[in-house]
Amino acid sequence: MLLSIEIQGKTQVDNLVDNLLKRWISVWVNHKIGVIVLAAGFANRMGKEKLLLSFRGKPLLSYALNLIEKLPVKEKIAVIGEPKQPLQSLCAQYHISSIYNKNRHLGQASSIACGVSYLPQDLEAFLFVVGDQPFLTGKLVDKLINIWQTYKSSQIIIRPYFEGRGYHPVLFGADWREELLSLTGDAGGRTLIQRHPECVVPVYWDNGDEFVDIDTLDDYAFWNQL
């Protein structure tokens, strides 16, 4: 009986600590960053909509959503395309708001503008994550956020690099808001990165698998079976 009381007491204390920790995180660690999951593409190279394809037992998009759900940031949204209803439902499972991009035929820039315009204007940075990068880890995302905390510059652009090439996710300081809204075509944020290299803080990463995106049926078949 004494043993059961001790175990029960320990559980109650653990729950109390967990709740206090969550409260502390929400108050003090909720960075004023808006995370935008880009999930509105046409998957032309795949030949069919891909974000709901089962990848290692879960919808492909769920890996990005699961990662983003855990981040201590102020805003989290996904910009989605088709099939609209199933994608909305999947985002809701991870407590992430979704917004449908009716202009997705205009390229990735339209999704960037869609997401940025939806978020409140008091944010200090925007972090863009793509929906087809299933091996992305919290360690890398935390690194980007920690670097942003160090600089706290509204003009910063933080981008990871592997073997000389830049990848997602990318973080933009709040001063880029209007330029992000005015982007056109499918180049997305690369246009700003190329135009303003002096503002880019590179993060050199040693695990290239994190940047694998599932673009083709061959990609899907290869990475799904490993």
Image (cartoon, rainbow, N blue to C red):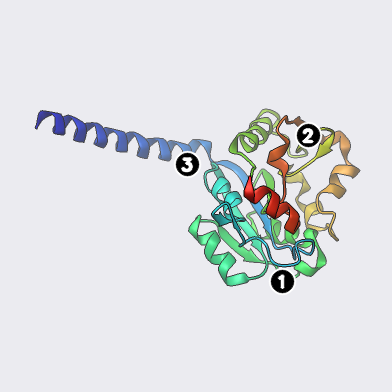
Q: Is residue 122 visible?
A: no
Position of 9 with respect to 137 (left or right) is left
Residues under labels 1 and 2: Cα distance? 33 Å
Which residue is label 2 attached to?
Answer: 162
Image mark count: 3
Quadrant assignment for the C terminus: top right
Q: Which mark is residue 102?
A: 1
Q: Nearer the viewer, mark 1 or mark 3?
A: 1
The mark that comes first in sequence, 1 or 3, is 3
Residues under labels 1 and 3: Cα distance? 33 Å
Which residue is label 3 attached to?
Answer: 26
The mark that comes first in sequence, 2 or 3, is 3
The mark that comes first in sequence, 1 or 2, is 1
Q: Is residue 109 above or below residue 25?
A: below
Asked whether 97 or 165 is in front, the reply is 165
Q: Which secondary structure, mark 3?
A: helix
Tell me the kind of residue under disc 2: Phe
Tell me the kind of residue under disc 1: Lys
Asked whether 124 or 129 is in front, the reply is 129
On the image, the x and y values in percent for residue 21 come to: 40, 35
Q: Mark 1: give few (<14), some (14-19) or many (20+) Cα within 10 Å.
A: some
Quadrant assignment for the N terminus: top left
Q: Mark 2: give few (<14), some (14-19) or many (20+) Cα within 10 Å.
A: some
Asked whether 221 or 149 is in front, the reply is 221
